[in-house]
Image: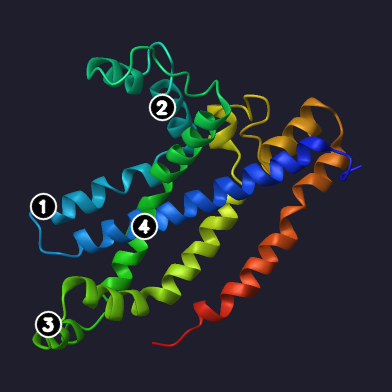
């Protein structure tokens, strides 16, 4: 029955795209956040606490907030686009497949990157200052210091949180369900939302349980592939 379900292949593609792109950008923005907040900037502690708010906010609040922001007629995003003259007709963010996929990724990214930032910031603070001082004396540029000191030191931490975030994102339900409901036309349907729809709205609990377990082998393969990098010694 699983192989005959045409929607299931779309769900696999949607979930893979959602998890891969979201996690990749969370690593990038989290690393930037960590590097900036590791410097001696004014009000550093304030920004550290303020940037953590998206992570600690309830998921339902996040979903409903972004749903309002992406609203075609009264959303703040379209209001700004119209005010700046960037568009003539307000885009229907949640009504077209491509933009709906982008919308859930943006919402997930906004909510998740502070976790990466705070975790990587803790890793940055464990790097001996002497390494940077020696590299600076040798004439290393900022990029060379990041490439040869920061990234290798943070590599085990990065792969650990990549695994955690991939598992969480792969099984995301609340954010996507309240933002798009899996639509339009199953464009944002993930394993969690599809199994819920099949099980509780279609009354096929057995089939829903089978759908929810499809991602398990993929997660096991991911963990086995990245485990050696997690345990890499400095």
Q: Which residue is mark 4?
A: 28
Crowdedness near tag 3: few (<14), some (14–19) or many (≥20) residues, C-alpha within 10 Å = some
Q: Residue at x 11, y 83 (%)?
A: 139
> In front: mark 4 or mark 1?
4
Q: Which residue is mark 3?
A: 136
Q: Which residue is mark 2?
A: 65
Q: Position of residue 144 (x, y in %)?
A: 23, 76
Crowdedness near tag 2: few (<14), some (14–19) or many (≥20) residues, C-alpha within 10 Å = some
Alpha-carbon distance for marks 3 and 1? Answer: 26 Å
Name the element at disc 3.
helix
Name the element at disc 2.
helix
Question: In the rendered image, which quarter is residue 201 located in?
Answer: top right
Along the polypeptide, which appears first: circle 4 or circle 1?
4
Q: Which residue is mark 1?
A: 43
Quadrant for the N terminus in the image: top right
Alpha-carbon distance for marks 3 and 4? Answer: 24 Å
Along the polypeptide, which appears first: circle 2 or circle 1?
1
> In front: mark 3 or mark 1?
3
Q: Position of residue 125 (x, y in %)?
A: 25, 73
């Amino acid at each position: 029955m699983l192989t005959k379900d045409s929607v299931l292949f779309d769900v696999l593609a949607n979930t893979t795209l959602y998890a891969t792109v979201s996690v990749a950008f969370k690593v990038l923005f989290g690393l930037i956040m960590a590097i900036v907040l590791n410097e001696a900037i004014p009000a550093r502690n304030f920004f550290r606490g303020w940037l953590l708010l998206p992570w600690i906010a309830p998921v339902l609040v996040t979903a409903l907030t972004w749903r309002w922001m992406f609203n075609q007629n009264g959303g703040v995003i379209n209001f700004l686009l119209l005010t700046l003259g960037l568009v003539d007709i307000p885009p229907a963010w949640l009504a077209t497949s491509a933009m709906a996929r982008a919308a859930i990724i943006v919402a997930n990214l906004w909510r998740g990157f502070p976790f990466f930032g705070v975790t990587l910031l803790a890793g940055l603070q464990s790097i001996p200052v002497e390494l940077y001082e020696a590299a600076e004396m040798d004439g290393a540029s900022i990029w060379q210091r990041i490439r040869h000191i920061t990234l290798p030191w943070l590599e085990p931490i990065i792969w650990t949180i990549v695994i955690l975030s991939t598992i969480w994102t792969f099984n995301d339900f609340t954010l996507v369900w309240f933002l798009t409901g899996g639509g339009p036309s199953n464009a944002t349907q993930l394993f969690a939302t599809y199994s819920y729809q099949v099980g509780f709205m279609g009354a096929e609990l057995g089939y829903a349980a089978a759908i929810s377990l499809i991602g398990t082998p993929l997660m096991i393969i991911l963990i086995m592939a990245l485990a050696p990098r997690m345990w890499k010694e400095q």
